[in-house]
Image (cartoon, helix red, strand yellow):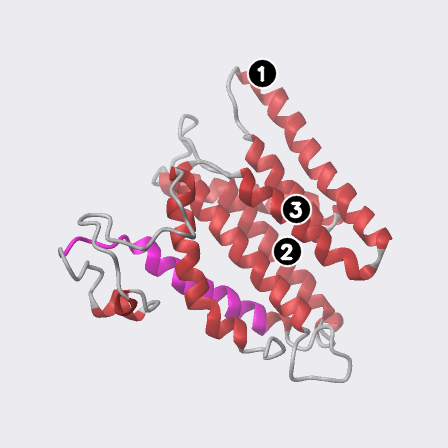
Amino acid sequence: MLDSPWLPLVLAPFIGSFLGVLASRLPRGEPVVFARSACMQCRTVLGPRDMVPVVSYLVRKGRCRSCGGVIHLSHLLMEVLAVLVAAVVLSVVGSAGVPGNGAFPSPFLLWGGCLFGWWLLTLGMIDLAYFRLPDILTLPLVVAGLAMSAPAGVAAILWHGGAAMMGYGSFRVIALLYRRVRGHDGLGGGDAKLLAAGGAWLGPQALPHIVLVAALLTLCGAAIAGRGRLDRGLAVPFGPGLALAMWGIWLWQAWLLRPDGLAL
């Protein structure tokens, strides 16, 4: 069953629904797994028909069945984006890792890409809303990256582990220098841990590319938020840019593993 290439796509809306709850509750210190889903306005516990991903939101037009209160659009967005992550990974991975089979991707690579994308999606959404990258999500992502390199042997684990340390150390040094020069924080510890995860998943050669692409994406985000102007006093989270850069580079690496991708 896990070998089916379509399974991540089928499960993606439900995973996105859970990730939406996680991104909403975790930064506020609320229980995630053991608490029943309820309307934020009237606290009515939601039934099964209220929690069908995407469909329930569209049928109820984004409003609570009991009180008519508005359901935050972020829940629908997370469900849709989770499906998009699975669809893009399935499209990009293709036949990577399966010699002689042009139809089905490697389950290990497929699930790994979806896991990476969903994890980064959650972190990016949390940082965008709360300017936080919780350790409970960033640190396990580092471990997961090292686990993904394990099938290639001990040397690969050490290579990616060294990249994780390089990513974390470089951002911590930059953060300390920035604080000394400017007198306030510019990069948080969560950004350094997220870059460490990027090193663990993608290797040391990807670190400069991650930082460059993330910086460009963040500058674009700052320009959009400032309506075309870059305001030095505007606080812009770096996590979403890092997350997009890391996942994009993972997709590029996965594409290069395809038989047709190697020719590029």
Q: Tell me if 62 is positioned left or right of 218 in this view.
A: left
Q: Position of residue 133 (x, y in %)?
A: 51, 39
Farthest front residue? 34
- The one nearer the camera, 9 or 221, is 9
Question: Can you tell which quarter of the image residue 130 is in?
Answer: top left
What residue span does the magenta drawing correspond to?
Answer: 68-91
Tell me the residue that label 2 is attached to.
Answer: 249
Q: Label 2: few (<14), some or many (≥20) within 10 Å?
A: some
Position of 227 relative to 112 (above/below)? above
Farthest left residue? 67
Tell me the residue that label 3 is attached to.
Answer: 142
Q: Tell me if 137 is positioned left or right of 224 in this view.
A: right
Q: Position of residue 198 (x, y in %)?
A: 65, 47
Q: Label 1: few (<14), some or many (≥20) within 10 Å?
A: few
Determine the residue positioned at 58% across, 43% down. Answer: 138
Q: Nearer the viewer, mark 1 or mark 3?
A: 3
Position of 146 relative to 98 (above/below)? above
- The one nearer the camera, 234 or 86, is 86
Q: Label 3: few (<14), some or many (≥20) within 10 Å?
A: many
